[in-house]
Image (spheres, rainbow, N blue to C red):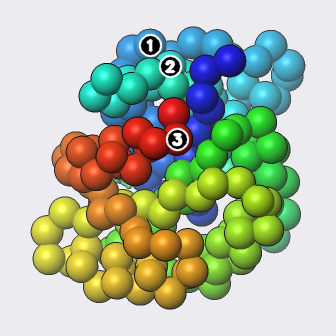
Amino acid sequence: MPFALAIVGRPNVGKSTLFNRLVGKRLALVDDQPGVTRDLREGEARLGDLRFTVVDTAGLEEATDDSLQGRMRALTERAIAEADAALFLVDARAGVTPVDEALADLLRKSGKTVLLGANKSEGAKGAAGALEAYALGLGDPIELSAEHGEGMGELLAALQPLV
Ligand code: GDP
Ligand code: MG
């Protein structure tokens, strides 16, 4: 069984952008079950010399504000149940929100290995959010820019001992 990494986090932090960067055009392996395809996207990731399965928690975009918290919790739980580790992304520009804190709690209680990524860290606006992310109690945030491909070496270094 290949190592599986679930990318989790609230909407708009850049999960799918990172997923696409890791998977490129090798998107495959989607579950046949109705609904699952849209909610959890699975692909074959390449990062340096590592090969692993990566899961994107999609399917949050169409949720209303009322249903979002519950859906996000349920989806995140489903994604990490199947995964060996989670990469929890926060938005370094937006800073840490109460929703991020709730997800961090859930992840801490899951007992899984959790890597913390502060995405959108490129440029000066990213620095404050990355600092805030330390307070989540999930270790040192890896400063990433999924869009610009920054921090991939640090992500690789964090994953290397796990995969
Ligand atoms: P998701 O909802 O977590 O899957 O987030 P998306 O991958 O759809 O990205 C949400 C928005 O953030 C999009 O407009 C992306 O272009 C943007 N985004 C993603 N990664 C970065 C990044 O590293 N830096 C910046 N500035 N924007 C990003
Ligand atoms: Mg997405």
Q: Residue at x 55, y 81 (%)?
A: 136
Q: Secondary structure at mark 3?
A: loop
Left/right of residue 150 with respect to residue 142 in the rendered view: left
**Which is closer to the viewer, label 3 or label 1?**
3
Q: Residue at x 64, y 80 (%)?
A: 101
| Pointer 2 with pointer 1, Cβ within 8 A | yes
Q: Residue at x 51, y 25 (%)?
A: 52
Lower position in the chain sequence, tag 2 or tag 3: 2
Amino acid type at circle 2 is Glu
Kindly report the distance in space between the C-alpha atoms of the residues bearing marks 2 and 1.
6 Å
Residue topped by disc 3:
162
Q: Position of residue 62 (x, y in %)?
A: 69, 49
Q: Is residue 47 above or below residue 103?
A: above
Kindly report the distance in space between the C-alpha atoms of the residues bearing marks 3 and 1.
22 Å
**Which is closer to the viewer, label 2 or label 1?**
2
Amino acid type at circle 1 is Arg
**Which is closer to the viewer, label 2 or label 3?**
3
Residue topped by disc 1:
26
Q: Secondary structure at mark 2?
A: strand
Q: Nearer the viewer, residue 44 or 126?
A: 44
Q: Is residue 32 above or below residue 48?
A: above
- Which residue of the protein is positioned furthest toward the left in this rendering? 123
Lower position in the chain sequence, tag 3 or tag 1: 1
Does the beta carbon of the residue at mark 3 sit less than 8 Å from ligand 1? no
